[in-house]
Image (spheres, rainbow, N blue to C red):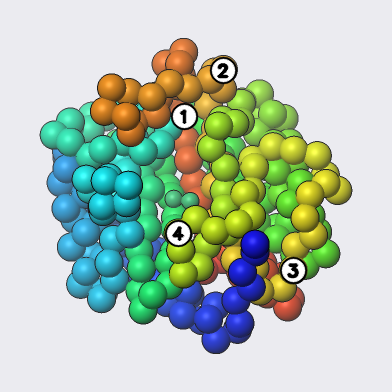
Amino acid sequence: MIIKKTPAQIEKMARAGKVLAEVIKEMGDAIRPGVTLKELDEMAERSMRLRGAVPSFLGYRGFPASICASPNEMVVHGIPDGRKLKEGDICSADFGVILDGWHADSAYTFPVGKVSDAARKLLEVTQAALEAGIACCRSGNRIGDIGNAIQRVIEDAGLSVVREFVGHGIGRSMHEDPQVPNCGTAGRGPVLEEGWVLAIEPMVTTGGWETKILDDNWGVVMADGSLSAHFEHTVAIAANGPRTLTAL
Ligand code: MG
Ligand code: MG
């Protein structure tokens, strides 16, 4: 069941989204060689709570932290630990908050210092794929249009879509219907309607798309060890087109 949001509810979600945008901006300013993933997690949690929001990941199915931090070949769901980032790493970070009962969800892959050309291209293509997906978030389009647009940007650049994880509806819960795959056929799937709010979140890799789960049962890494990136925005389908609620 897809739950539509009223314009007033979307305004509340936009307030949650603004918190995330500010938290991500702060992290971008702070991330550097030598910082630990745990320090980034603590910084994000403090920053969320200072703005009156609650980190939605903390305790979600037992997840022990406020953000997911997934460096290099890790694609999603990394538990922030004492690992230090080093020059040339990339680090995907996924963030969620609840503000006044409404969720926002956003992810960003940060370069750490100077990164390789391959890493820079991966980040640029993943962001471009996210923008292409967002541009399809208009009433009358179909879910398959979003995935198809994302997949085309990624594969045209010679990169691969990570297929096991998908975007989703969001609202009073972090994960609502519908699922939003990052690949697919244009013209297929449910017709988008004004009032839907979707988390669009391409995950992209430089190698094959198969993944495996670490022994902690959370962290997901690329099976062949390739670099991966993840960008995500929470997007409302408004009367005049897409409105990115977590815009930086
Ligand atoms: Mg997320
Ligand atoms: Mg999400």
> Marks 2/4: CA distance?
29 Å
Which quarter of the rendered picture does the C terminus lie within? bottom left
Q: Earlier in the sequence, mark 3 or mark 2?
A: 3
Looking at the rendered structure, the secondary structure element under dot 3 is loop
Amino acid, disc 1: Ser
Q: Which residue is mark 3?
A: 193
Residue 171 visible in the picture: yes
**Nearest the camera: 202 or 84?**
202
Q: Which residue is mark 1?
A: 228
Q: Residue furthest bottom?
A: 8
Question: Do the numbered discs 2 and 4 sit on residues whose CB atoms are within 8 Å?
Answer: no
Amino acid, disc 2: Gly
> Marks 4/1: CA distance?
23 Å
Q: Which residue is mark 4?
A: 174
Q: Which residue is mark 2?
A: 208
> Marks 3/1: CA distance?
32 Å
User: What residue is at 18 percent from the left and 63 percent from the top?
Assistant: 46
User: What residue is at 56 percent from the left and 17 percent from the top?
Assistant: 208
Residue 91 visible in the picture: no
